[in-house]
Amino acid sequence: MMALKWGSPPAMAMETKVTKSCGSLRASSLIKVVADGSSGSGFPSFIPKEIEKIRDPFARSLCRRIVRLPVLTEVSESCIMSSCVKPQIRSEINPIVLLHSFDSSCLEWRSTYPLLEKGGLEAWAVDVLGWGFSDLERLPPCNADSKRYHLYQLWKSYVKRPMILVGPSLGAAVAIDFAVNYPEAVEKMVLINPSVYAEGTGNLAKLPKIVAYAGVSLLKSFPLRLYANLLTFNGISLSKGLDWTNVGRLHCHLPWWKDATVDFMASGGYNVVSQIKQVRQEVLIIFSEHDQIVSNQLATRLQTDLPNATMRKIPGCSHLPHVDKPNHVAKLITTFSRYDHS
């Protein structure tokens, strides 16, 4: 991994204009988005205390930059305070917006995000509605339609320019669904080991609630998450596997995580198979040589099904190359972002 030292910005309160009524927030009022913690650690106050168990320096650094911004939802035109990492620079090329995989958070980009910034890119790392570190105390629906609308409102309120939308694993399905419904918001897409051919959550959507909650509790369990990490990353040490497990399940400690995940499962999840051939944007497909989660054959199928797609292989890694091969992924995204096909 490239040696890279990058500092965290000082804890501060940021202000943003709210242009529509958001629940109890009135139009054009100034809303303070507090990004500092109360303990003097520099972590936002809404981050679970389990952050102190994490040793990964990139995770700790990126975590200090997470903020919550008011974003409109479909429910009674109310707002939720939505978590993301905001760019510190404005680029001449269109911004990068980084999604994450199933039941994850913006911390998935901890290793690649600083490299993108170092390369001069204007990058957002956003938490998909229902996952990550947003305030979901008043639980909104967390189905695919709500996730799409929430991402659109975040883009409309803050990003405001056509974006290069990056989606790993299930995040690729989120990206395709969004790009087809809001083509004006997406210039290009990068899909990493895309999981886009599953037809939703299948029979899981039919589970009785008590069974669904039991299953979600298992999903949070440390042993299962550790096993998934060891499956996802090739040849990592046990100590790193333990630490990365703590990173991957940090958002699960928020009190509404279980309800939001069950709601997503019960909704049927993402089924974008019929939308794939409707994609009109240029797409870069990145696939890993040793992915044990999504077959490489599906990446090849996707390249065929998409009207305008190219593929690049990353050797020697598994399902989440932006975590364990950040230099390679950052280079591919940067080159693709700067390349003007026209």
Image (spheres, rainbow, N blue to C red):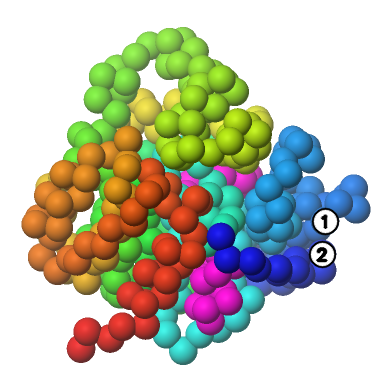
Residue 40 image position (x, y, % from top left): 90, 53
> Few, some or many C-alpha atoms within 10 Å of disc 2 (few <14, some 14-19, many ≥20)?
some
Q: Which mark is residue 11?
A: 2
Query: For residue 104: magenta?
Result: no
Q: Secondary structure at mark 1?
A: loop
Residue 307 image position (x, y, % from top left): 10, 65
Question: Looking at numbered disc 2 in the image, what kind of residue is underneath it?
Answer: Ala
The reply to whether dot 2 and dot 1 touch (C-beta < 8 Å) is yes
Q: Secondary structure at mark 2?
A: loop
Residue 24 image position (x, y, % from top left): 66, 54
Q: Nearer the viewer, residue 71 or 304?
A: 304
* Position of the N terminus by quadrant: bottom right
The answer to whether residue 22 of the structure is visible from this angle is no
Could you give the CA–CA distance between mark 2 and mark 1, rounded to whole angstroms?
6 Å
Q: Is residue 89 above or below residue 263?
A: below
Q: Magenta residues, as a range?
A: 113-136
Q: Which residue is mark 1?
A: 42
Q: Which mark is residue 240?
A: none
